[in-house]
């Protein structure tokens, strides 16, 4: 599975668990630490934890191993490092605060349609 497919899998898992405002940013041209950022919001701290747990479980089934994790569900932010794909899950308040989309606004935002996520 290539990095774009891993990002697409993250989108599928997050959408399946009703994450809010899922965005994928291709940072390949601007970053040395990763190729894709996947950003999503949870409607509550509990959902933030559920979303990260589901990503970890579903990725493990595919043999995609997490290299590291930062944050906690009750902090309103979790960063999951899968090497060249970084998954950020925020509460709405923390997402507004960090505004990652603005920081990376000069990069390509990728849309995955439902048929490509199957």
Image (spheres, rainbow, N blue to C red):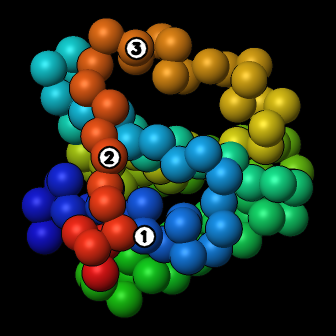
The residue carrying pointer 2 sits among few (fewer than 14), some (14 to 19) or many (20 or more) residues within 10 Å by Cα, namely few
Horizontally, residue 52 falls left or right of residue 47, namely: left
Q: Position of residue 19 (x, y in %)?
A: 65, 60
Q: Nearer the viewer, mark 2 or mark 1?
A: 2
**Residue for point 26% across, 26% down:** 108
Q: Nearer the viewer, residue 38 or 79?
A: 38
Precedes in sequence: disc 2 or disc 3: 3
Residue marked by disc 1 = 12
The span from disc 2 to disc 3 (Cα, nearest Å) is: 15 Å
Quarter where residue 38 is shown = top left
Residue beneath label 3, please?
105
- Asked if labels 3 and 2 touch by Cβ distance under 8 angstroms, the answer is no
Q: Earlier in the sequence, mark 3 or mark 1?
A: 1
Q: Is residue 6 left or right of residue 100?
A: left
Mark 1: give few (<14), some (14-19) or many (20+) Cα within 10 Å: many
Distance from disc 3 to disc 1, alpha carbons, whole Å, reads 23 Å
* Corner quadrant of residue 64: bottom left
Residue hosting label 2:
111
- Identify the secondary structure beneath mark 3: loop
Sequence-earlier tag: 2 or 1:
1
């Amino acid at each position: 599975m290539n990095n774009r497919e891993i990002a697409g899998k993250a989108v599928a898992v997050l959408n399946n668990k009703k994450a809010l405002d899922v965005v994928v940013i291709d940072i390949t041209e601007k970053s040395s630490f990763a190729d894709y950022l996947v950003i999503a919001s949870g409607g509550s701290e509990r959902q933030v934890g559920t979303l990260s747990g589901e990503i970890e479980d579903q990725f493990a089934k595919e043999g995609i191993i997490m290299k590291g994790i930062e944050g906690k569900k009750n902090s309103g932010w979790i960063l999951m490092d899968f090497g060249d794909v970084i998954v950020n899950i925020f509460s709405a308040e923390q997402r507004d605060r960090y505004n990652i989309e603005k920081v990376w606004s000069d990069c390509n935002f990728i849309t995955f349609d439902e048929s490509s996520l199957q």
